[in-house]
Image: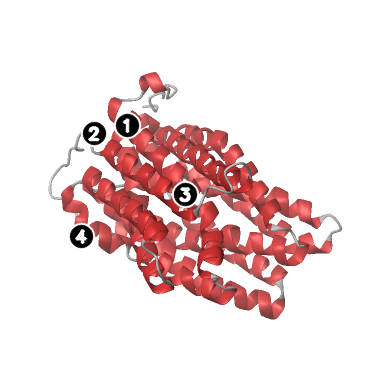
Amino acid sequence: MSKPIATPLRLRTMSRDLLIFALAVAGLGIATGIHETSFNNYLSDVFSMGTSARGFLEFPRELPGLLAVFFAGALISLGLIRVAALSLALLGLGLFGLGFLSTSVPTMVVWLIIWSIGNHLFMPLEGSIAVSLAKENSIGEVLGKLGSIRLATTILGAGIIWLGFGNFLQENLSYRHTYLAAAVIAIGSVIALMHIRPLPTKGKQTKLVWRKDYKIYYWLSLLWGVRKQIFITFAPWLLVQSFDQPASIIAQLWIVTSIIGVFFRPFLGKLSDTFGERALLLGEIPITIGLFLGYAFSPFFEYGVYIVFVCFVIDSQLSALTMVRTSYVSKILENENDLAPTLAMGVSLDHVSAMIMPIFGGFLWATFGSPTLFLSAIVFILINGFFANQAVVPKDVESAAA
């Protein structure tokens, strides 16, 4: 028996609830773009924060990601939509507190943690709700479309900061204005979510999931935490430290990769539906090895900075494979109610390795140089390939046999 042919996902073919969810995701994207592109300047301008203090701040900021599985487990009985609305309400409250109620560094950290709880709690819920609202043969495409929408609106949020602080609004715009705008938009997403009909559940909701049958997803999540730090931490640091690239160039590079991602993510989602998740996860391995080799040896070439630019752009697109892992685990579930807590477990495992990797990687870089770090990371990619090869969806096996 062959797979059913997926029809192209257009606005007119999307269900009412999926359209509303897309609107909520769009609002979150704008709020995220405003926050992420102004946060470092906010810390420097408002609190005169130095480099060491900024580095330490990453621990409380990322800690809720490690605890995501427990937050999700404690609240899952409320239903996915209500928990998602609560998470974005916390996110919006945190943004408001950052702008209006942060009178000192300690109070700022409190509001930052509240924002982070909401942000990390929504991460597994976003994929779970999307899968629940998608038709069986279009999960990858739905995830890709939503990822594209969020990325496009994040660029819009970043554009607000770029134009606001860089041009005609500069004299009248303050961090209070920007964080208030981000908070209001986030609450708008909460209101949108509350108009989605409660998702049906079958049987008792599972609060905490740790199943042997999901071990491949757990390993892929844990290894992704290592993998993503190369992209979000060490690749930009290579541009700054080895090639003396200014912040403006990094920002432009980020915008370029984001614009490409708006079109690439839906395409990747279609590839996932067509060829299966295992094929894409395996295809990532040789490409990533090539990228890491490019990062490692770029300092030895006269025009090595352009090698890093190209690697960074490609690397950015591969980060979208998170949705492929979501699609994979959604198809191997023993119980449909396992999806949200399983994705939450993935987020927590991701953050375990993501919090350790920068320390280990920084040591390798400082002691042996950047090439050693990037070449050593290839070992983790090969291990990832071993587990990706086992990411087989039972339905695909049955279809191939038929």
Q: Nearer the N terminus, badge 2 or badge 4?
A: 4
Residue holding disc 1: 20
Q: Can residue 135 be seen in the rendering of this structure?
A: no
Q: Are marks 2 and 4 in contact (CB under 8 Å)?
A: no
Report helix, strand or loop for mark 3: helix
Q: Amino acid at mark 2?
A: His
| Mark 2 Cα shell of 10 Å, populated few (<14), some (14-19), many (≥20) | few
Q: Looking at the picture, how far across and down is residue 173, in whole percent? A: 52, 48
Q: Is residue 325 above or below residue 380?
A: above
Position of 213 with respect to 377 (left or right) is left
Quadrant of the image occupied by residue 364 = bottom right
Position of 23 with respect to 312 (left or right) is left
Q: Nearer the viewer, residue 293 or 47?
A: 47
Task: Give the position of the C terminus as an image quadrant.
Answer: top left
Residue holding disc 2: 195
Q: Are marks 2 and 1 in contact (CB under 8 Å)?
A: yes
Q: Gap between marks 2 and 1, in whole Å?
A: 7 Å
Q: Gap between marks 2 and 3, in whole Å?
A: 27 Å
